[in-house]
Image (spheres, rainbow, N blue to C red):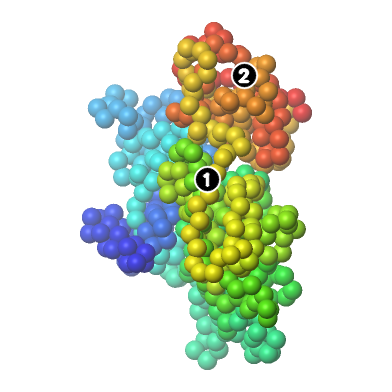
Amino acid sequence: MRKSFFALAAIALMALGFLVPANAATVSAKLAGRILLQVEEKGKAWYLNPQTQERAYLGRPADAFRIMRELGLGISNKDLAKIHSSASPTQEVGVDLAVSKKLAGKILLQVEAHGEAWYVNPTDLSLYFLGRPADAFAVMRGLGLGISNNDINTIPTAEKYADPEQPIIKAPQQSSTSITTPSTSAQSTTTPSPSTTPTPLSATDKATLAQMAGSYRCFSYNVSGGGGGDCRLFAPIVLNADGTYSISTEKGTYTVKGDVITLSESKLRGPGKLIGGTQIRFEYDYNGWHHTITYLKESGSVSTSPSGSPSEIPVQLILAYPAKDSSLSGITTVELVPEGQSYSGASYKPTAIAQYDGDKRIIGSFYKATNMPQTGKKYTVYTNTGFAQTAVGTLDLTTAKTETTATISVTPTGSSAAQQTETPSSTAADIEVDLKLVYSAKDSSLGSMNFVTLVKQGEDSATATYKPSTTALWDGDRTINASFWKSYNRVKTKAIYTVYTDYGYGLTAVGTLDLTNITTDPYAKTITVSQ
């Protein structure tokens, strides 16, 4: 059904003129500077750099924001004023069409101001302000042009900005219009591809591959210790019993030695680690960031239970929270640990991908051969965000005989930023705050910072009920940017706040934000942090 939807979407975009026509000549040159939406791969967004004619994967909003700044071209205020602004439809004074055409498709950094980023849309030669990460991402997607897999695979990939889920497309070595990919290299008609033809297997190898065979869906993706966004729509890893595998358009062979799995065409991820027979985890450094991505087996064979062991039954588990909370979408899996065992020490841990209903419930379906729990036991139920596990209740299957549906009412141990009601005991107005934390020296560990949090001075950071929090964005050098601008984290004035950073293992106080007499909205503040 999903495949049919994207096929229909591609046809519709073609009819409307928003999809690149098939067999387009010199696609890279023709589309230089455009934002491309890969409609057959869940609409993944790419920026085609007009200088190199290589495409960069935009990924998450924070990734897109960082990439655009790295690829940006400095421009003076005088020259920037010569380009038509999308915010002023009637602007004519000072516009120089020659300058607009020269800079079409480029990302510009306003060096005489605060380095604000702008994009010159090639189709209307107008400036679009890229603002914050979410704003930049929205602009890029709004101006995107649909493109098919066949056409985008004729455009070389910038290796520094590759999509970990797709093979890197190399530039042609000769003046040929065809592009060779790792998974579709041209072969002799008499010599089969070594990457896709499995070698003869021993009986032991056959048994191992038969056990591994199945579809593995991504459920956890973390970048340098912080969240990497929802990866559940990533293309699954499909392992076949004959030793071949596929991930979207990437195809090759795989080998298993002990708890290590190696995919022949997975140049970026490297070898993966097998966990508990149902998970594959890849850890690799890319573009200065440490990536951890974990896949969960969603179909295929599993080891049979030993004779006399408890039977397994399908379970539908519903976690009901007391209030709507968008942060629940960050839960990636629901996991069952036999009562009396620790989370880290348990070797048997049925796991289901978490499904958030957009309101107050998380649903975990333990109904596949790979994750059905054994009866005759009680389990502690954990939620997992990819970098933290939380016990939320107990599932009793001691007397269960058939398919079971259970609901657990979860009592949160604290309130998330999305739950905060912004009703402290004052009549203070709330304002947008743009906070910069400037460190004395470049430090790559800053890339591991998750959040910046504000706590009213004099209150305990552990018990305070009003704690505006936002994602920490590292600029790759010495600065952390933190924007408190959403409805749930704008900051109350008439107060002094202690500023905390959060790496996921505790809060660290780094400075003070005094808003006792501030009425400016938005308000910008720079704090120098001692290292």
Please state which of residues 331 and 441 is positioned toward the viewer in this rendering. Answer: 331
Circles 1, 2 touching at the beta carbon (< 8 Å):
no
Above or below: residue 328 compared with residue 364 = above
Residue at position x 75%, y 25% from top?
530
Q: Secondary structure at mark 2?
A: strand
Residue at position x 55%, y 87% from top?
192
- The percent position of residue 421, horizontal first and vertical second, equals 48, 26
Note whether residue 388 is visible.
Answer: yes
Q: Secondary structure at mark 1?
A: strand
Q: Which of the 4 image quarters holds residue 26?
A: bottom left
Residue mark closest to the camera, 1 vs 2:
1
- In the picture, the quarter occupied by the C terminus is top right
- The percent position of residue 257, horizontal first and vertical second, equals 72, 75
Residue at position x 32%, y 33% from top?
86
Give the left or right position of residue 411, taking residue 40 as reference.
Answer: right
Note whether residue 24 is visible.
Answer: no
Q: Residue furthest front?
A: 399
Q: Residue furthest top?
A: 517
**Residue type of the residue flagged with mark 1:** Ser
Please state which of residues 488 and 270 is positioned toward the viewer in this rendering. Answer: 488
* Residue carrying label 1: 409
Q: CA distance from mark 1 to mark 2?
A: 31 Å
Mark identifier at residue 205: none
Q: Which of the 4 image quarters holds residue 376?
A: bottom right
* Residue carrying label 2: 456
Residue at position x 61%, y 52% from top?
394
- The percent position of residue 378, horizontal first and vertical second, equals 64, 59
